[in-house]
Image (cartoon, grey):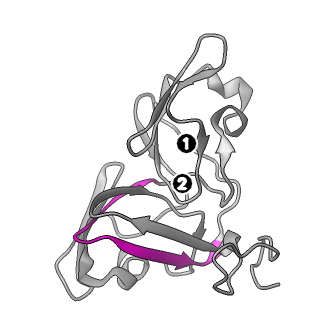
Amino acid sequence: DHCENGDDNYDGDADGTPDDCDVDHDLHEGANLVSFFALPGNTSVSNIFAPLGDNANGVIGESVVSANFGDGNWVGSLTDIASDGGYWLKVSEAADFETQGLPTGAVNYSLNEGNNLSSYSYAVDQYIGDAIPAGAQAGFYGVAGEGIAAIALPDGGWAGSLNAFEGGKGYWLV
């Protein structure tokens, strides 16, 4: 079992690590809204973002932040990356960024009224209406990702440019 608790049969980038245990981010210069569906044992900000070196300027989660002061010296209230969190990661230059670890699988989210910066906890994309349980959809106003959004309709459907949650992306759940 190469990817414990994950599917060993799919390795889309052929790097030897199955997709369920391999989060690949194609970062553009500036702020990127990301999440992690697989995490290593050490979830510290300095460990997770070490491959980016000083290209990573900082990371912001919901009500927490950490800044990179160079040479792996991260300072702030955000100390560890969580499986249920979404994060704004700011980089100076475009980069490919990979994190390997155990799949987070089904995550229980504790949502507050208003805006919640959250993860999507699977490698495989999923339509919003399928991902959010039918009984919970009435409690949503909308969902926003990086440059895309959907609003909940009174009939239970969704409208907007955001159709599906994508692995490795973060989302504002409202």
Residue where numbered disc 2 is placed: 84
> The magenta stretch spans which residues?
86-102
Query: Does residue 83 belong to the magenta stretch?
Result: no
Instruction: From the viewer's perspective, tell me whether residue 148 is left or right of residue 21.
Output: left
Q: Quadrant of residue 73?
A: bottom left
Marks 2 and 1 in Cβ contact (< 8 Å) = yes
Rendered location of residue 103, percent (x, y): 67, 69
Measured along the vertical axis of the image, is residue 45 above or below residue 173? below
Q: CA distance from mark 2 to mark 1?
A: 9 Å
Quadrant location of the N terminus in the rendered image: bottom right
Work out whether residue 166 or residue 105 is closer to the camera in this orientation and state it. Answer: 166
Q: Quadrant of residue 167?
A: bottom right
Rendered location of residue 127, percent (x, y): 67, 39
Q: Which mark is residue 44?
A: none
Q: Residue at x 64, y 53 (%)?
A: 107
Rendered location of residue 15, percent (x, y): 63, 85
- Label 2 crowd bin: few (<14), some (14–19), many (20+), radius 10 Å: many
> What's under tag 1, amino acid-wise?
Ser
| Numbered label tally | 2
Instruction: From the viewer's perspective, tell me whether residue 98 is left or right of residue 1.
Output: left
Q: Residue furthest left?
A: 69
> What's under tag 2, amino acid-wise?
Asp
Dominant secondary structure of the magenta stretch? strand
Instruction: From the viewer's perspective, tell me whether residue 116 is left or right of residue 38.
Output: left
Measured along the vertical axis of the image, is residue 8 above or below residue 125? below
Q: Residue at x 61, y 41 (%)?
A: 164
Instruction: From the viewer's perspective, tell me whether residue 69 is left or right of residue 137.
Output: left
- Label 1 crowd bin: few (<14), some (14–19), many (20+), radius 10 Å: few
Q: Is residue 44 visible?
A: no
Residue where numbered disc 1 is placed: 110
For marks 2 and 1, give the one nearer the viewer: 2
